[in-house]
Every structure is written in structure tokens, then in C-alpha cells.
């Protein structure tokens, strides 16, 4: 499965999402590669201490590294360039659009979805940096996105300082410690929210595979010869 994490806006946790989706699947003993397709190379920087449970590979070296991987997660670059988008869609099975509940981020995800609707690729928005004190803004964000027929994952990623500490230390959020070296109390909330998102992404991918498999060209009969009525 090829998953691309993508969006038009900077700072919406594309890299954080790519790093954690890849980590969850790696923990499930899947062979995972994280491809860094962003020119700012933040996924590469995140993985530079070699503490992540999979390799982080720059896009230029992706072809060989992706061979043999069960799951390839690509940390895409913020862009709305049509040519880039077309290439990205062709190279992916499913696209994840991290979106914060803020209006600008919602607008850009809606815009992106209208571009993606030109292709037959499944995609879903993932609400990230959700402040637990502002539940209503996350609820209205879901309502707005769904109003535009955008599939929104049920899992929402909470806003947690544990994510920032994790990035500073080059580890995933489940191993996040504060400046004094104490484990962040809410770190597992962050981890499980990405775990749940992974299951939903797999389900969406499988549902799409089944839906496209059942669409057979008109007039074709795939029933085995021996099973056909005479
Ligand atoms: N759920 C979260 N809670 C708190 N901080 C977060 C969360 N997710 C990401 N961050 C932090 O937000 C910042 C931006 O995240 P990230 O680098 O993943 O965004 P990005 O979309 O990849 O940005 P860019 O467009 O620059 O590549 C980072 O400091 C990251 O640690
Ligand atoms: Mg990034």
C-alpha cells in the first residue's frame, strides 16, 4: 500500500503524521519505508538519530528502497501544482490530508479535495492538533468538511506538547519525555489516535479496492467456464 500524506498548507503536521502512521505499521511488524518527498527534508531530519523503527529515504532514492516494503508512506510537500498533484496521485493508493480545525486549513483541504475529485483515488481528511478544550471547533470542522463530501477519519489527533518533544528527540510520541526526562503523561493518547487512524486508512483502502474490483466492463463474464450454464 502506498500512502501519501499531503496538503497545501505548511505546519499542519504532515511530517508528524507520516512519521507516526509509519511507526504504527512498523510496530505491527509490517515492512515500512518512509519516503521524504519534501524539499525541506524535515522527515529526514526527524529520523536522523536513527531512533525510528523504519528507514527514512529521500525521494531520489525511493525506487530501490520501496522494493519489498509492505507499506510505503510518503511525506509530501505542501503544493497545489497540478502537475505535481497528478504525479502524486499516480504514485499513491490513498491520500491523507492532515487538517487543523482552523478555517484556513479547512479551506485549503476543501480546495484540495475538489482537485482530487478529478481522479479515482480514495482520500480522507485527518483532523490534527485538536485542542481538547475546544471540542466544538473540531465538531464544526468535521461538519464543514463532511458538508463538502469529504471523508473525515473518526480518529482525531490531539494537540499535545508530547509531539513536539518527540520530534526534538527524534522519537515517536509514545517515547516522548519532557525537558526533565519524565515521560509525558498524555503521550499514549497521541499514539493511540494515530493507531486508530491507521486502521481506518486500511479499511478505506480495502473498501476502495473491493469497489473498484467489482466494477467490471459491461458484457464481460468472469464466471469460470465450467460453472457457466450451458
Ligand atoms: N498533534 C500535535 N500536537 C502538538 N504539536 C504538533 C502536533 N503535530 C505536529 N506538531 C508540531 O507542529 C509542528 C509542525 O508539524 P510538522 O512539521 O509535522 O508539519 P508539516 O505540515 O510537515 O510542516 P511543513 O509544511 O513545514 O513540512 C512541529 O513542531 C510538530 O512537532
Ligand atoms: Mg513537513
Image: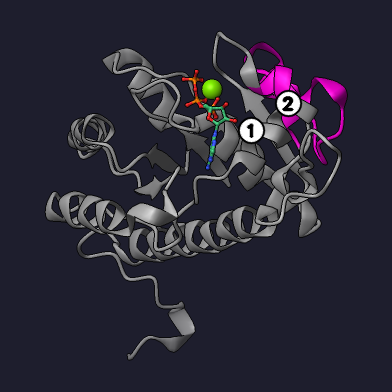
Residue at position x 87%, y 27% in the image: 50
Q: In the image, ligand 2 is in what quadrant?
A: top right
Dot 2, how many residues are within 10 Å of its Cα: few (below 14), some (14-19), or many (20+)?
A: few
Q: Nearer the viewer, residue 22 or 214?
A: 22
Can the viewer see residue 72 in this picture?
no
Residue 176, percent from left and from top: 76, 43
Residue at position x 26%, y 58% in the image: 136
Residue identified by numbered label 1: 164
Residue identified by numbered label 2: 168
Residue 62, percent from left and from top: 68, 21
In the image, residue 88 above or below residue 213: above
SS at badge 2? helix
Dot 1, how many residues are within 10 Å of its Cα: few (below 14), some (14-19), or many (20+)?
A: some
In the image, residue 215 above or below residue 11: below
Query: What is the magenta range?
Result: 43-67
Q: Is residue 22 magenta?
A: no
Q: Is mark 1 within 8 Å of ligand 1?
A: yes
Can the viewer see residue 151 in this picture?
yes
Q: Is mark 2 within 8 Å of ligand 1?
A: yes
Are the residues at dot 1 and dot 2 in contact (C-beta closer than 8 Å)?
Answer: yes
Q: Nearer the viewer, residue 88 or 77?
A: 77
- Quadrant where the image shows the C terminus: bottom left
How far, Cα to Cα, is label 1 from label 2? 6 Å
Q: Is residue 61 left or right of residue 13?
A: right
Extreme residue toward the bottom, this view: 229
Q: Is residue 215 left or right of residue 55?
A: left
Q: Quadrant of residue 40?
A: top right
Amino acid at each position: 500500500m502506498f500512502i501519501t500524506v499531503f496538503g497545501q498548507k505548511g505546519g499542519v503536521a504532515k511530517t508528524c503524521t507520516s512519521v507516526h502512521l509509519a511507526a504504527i505499521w512498523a510496530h505491527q511488524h509490517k515492512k515500512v519505508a518512509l519516503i521524504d518527498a519534501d524539499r525541506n527534508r524535515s522527515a529526514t531530519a526527524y529520523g536522523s538519530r536513527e531512533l525510528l523503527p523504519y528507514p527514512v529515504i529521500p525521494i531520489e532514492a525511493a525506487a530501490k528502497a520501496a522494493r519489498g516494503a509492505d507499506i510505503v508512506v510518503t511525506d509530501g510537500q505542501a503544493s497545489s501544482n497540478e502537475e505535481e498533484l497528478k504525479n502524486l496521485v499516480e504514485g499513491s493508493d490513498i491520500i491523507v490530508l492532515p487538517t487543523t480545525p482552523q478555517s484556513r486549513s479547512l479551506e485549503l483541504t476543501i480546495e484540495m479535495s475538489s482537485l482530487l475529485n478529478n481522479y479515482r483515488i480514495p482520500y480522507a481528511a485527518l483532523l490534527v492538533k485538536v485542542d481538547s478544550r475546544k471540542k466544538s471547533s473540531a465538531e464544526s470542522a468535521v461538519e464543514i468538511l463532511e458538508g463538502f463530501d469529504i471523508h473525515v477519519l473518526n480518529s482525531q489527533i490531539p494537540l499535545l506538547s508530547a509531539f513536539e518533544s518527540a520530534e526534538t528527540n527524534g522519537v515517536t510520541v509514545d517515547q516522548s519525555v519532557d525537558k526533565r526526562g519524565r515521560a509525558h503523561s498524555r503521550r499514549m493518547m497521541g499514539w493511540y489516535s494515530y493507531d486508530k487512524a491507521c486502521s481506518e486508512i486500511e479499511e478505506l483502502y480495502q473498501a476502495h479496492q473491493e469497489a473498484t474490483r467489482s466494477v467490471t466492463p459491461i458484457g464481460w463474464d468472469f464466471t469460470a467456464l465450467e460453472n457457466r450454464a450451458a
